[in-house]
Image: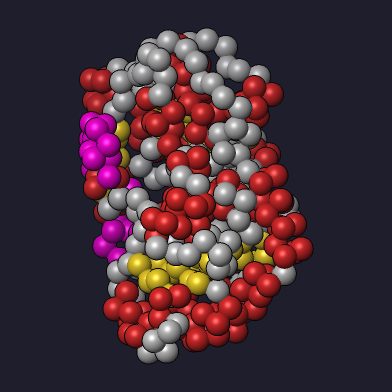
Amino acid sequence: MAVARSLRALPAAPELAWIGGHRGLEAGIVPGIGIPFSRLALRSLRSAGRDVHLVLDPLRLAASFPQALWLLARHRPDAIVTSGGYVAIPILAAARLLRIPTILWEGNVVPGRSVRATARLADVVAVSFEATCAALGVERCYVTGTPIRDPRAIDREAARERLGIPAAPRLLLVFGGSQAVRRFNAAVAGALERLVERCWVLHVTGEAGYAEMQAVRDALPPERRDRYRPFPFLAGEMTAALAAADLVVGRAGSSTLAEAAAFGLPMVCVPYPHAAGHQRANADAYAATGAAHVVADADFDADALVAAARLLDDPVGHLAMSAAARGAARPGAADAVARLVLAAAMRVAYPPSAEIARLAAGGSGVSGGGANA
């Protein structure tokens, strides 16, 4: 969606279409931004457990290839950009057969199985971490960073006003992403009385944990309750939450890390311990910049959260981590990927790495003519 935003901002914006799968979030989001949406037979995410889908997923994959071939032959796109998940396998295979240029983006240091299996089918690979290029061993690989929502959409003062948070207090933002938020909720519940003595807390609980955390809030002393703001989720308000925050505690998905960096936020990363350890590698690479501390999932509890919040009382350490975050940021990643898509669509030479690096760092300008993507 961030890349789509950059493409739509072009003087001659291309026509866009989206192909997804079942089980993913895109079916509920993409039509709302005015992009035609089609589904393949397979699901966007494979099953990790041993269930009926372990048998059905390969069958869906086989059925999705002729479907992908038909959709691409029908739309005849000038270029394809994909994040390389499971749903991308039949798309990339069909695109290679139809000679449609493709750009594959991978956000993790350690690429997933689908990306490893299909990266050589793509004309160009874009990544968030330089080490990923070496891991994939592809010929044309650019370090673009992770395309994210526009960090310039709101400033700190306006964000705090929108969220009803005073300008002066320190604000801790806690969110566990879409997976395994219960550990985060338990840590907040156990630490909350100590936290609200020191700072305000904005907490994304997930739908299942919201009522429980509301009860925890109600148990606080009346004069402290307003310092804790639980939300079941933050969709349109996540940009405001990031702009308003002083410290983030969250998982180590590439989007989370990229958004924290773009807002210059120090971070405490608690990597999701499953999914082949991808998030641990992301967290370690990001922490090496000086912008984050890493806490193992098994070690993350109320005491660990209180210890993490102590950074808010250390102005020198906080400033150093904030500067490191801004130094690691690539807020123009969406423009950089869009530039690659445009070159592919127009069948012109791909830009030099220095130009993509400039765009990723926030340099202005994705320019070019019209195309379909």
Q: Is residue 86 shown left or right of residue 257?
A: left
Q: Is residue 31 magenta?
A: yes
Residue 83, image x and y in percent?
45, 39
Q: Which residues are magenta?
A: 29-55
Residue 341, image x and y in percent?
47, 23
Q: Nearer the viewer, residue 259 or 201?
A: 201
Residue 45, image x and y in percent?
36, 52
Which residue is found at the position 35% from the left and 35% from the top?
Answer: 90
The answer to which image quadrant residue 53 occupies is: bottom left
Q: Colour scheme used in the picture? A: secondary structure
Q: Nearer the viewer, residue 265 or 301?
A: 265
Number of numbered labels in the structure image: 0
The answer to which image quadrant residue 230 occupies is: bottom left
Which residue is found at the position 30% from the left and 69% from the top?
Answer: 207
Q: Is residue 1 shown left or right of residue 155?
A: left
Q: Is residue 194 above or below residue 355?
A: below
Q: Is residue 22 magenta?
A: no
Residue 39, image x and y in percent?
23, 39
Which residue is found at the position 35% from the left and 19% from the top?
Answer: 14
Q: Is residue 57 shown left or right of residue 4?
A: left
Q: Is residue 229 visible?
A: yes
| Image quadrant where one finds the C terminus | top left
Q: Nearer the viewer, residue 32 or 337?
A: 32
| Image quadrant where one finds the N terminus | top left
Q: Is residue 120 visible?
A: no
Q: Nearer the viewer, residue 67 or 11?
A: 11
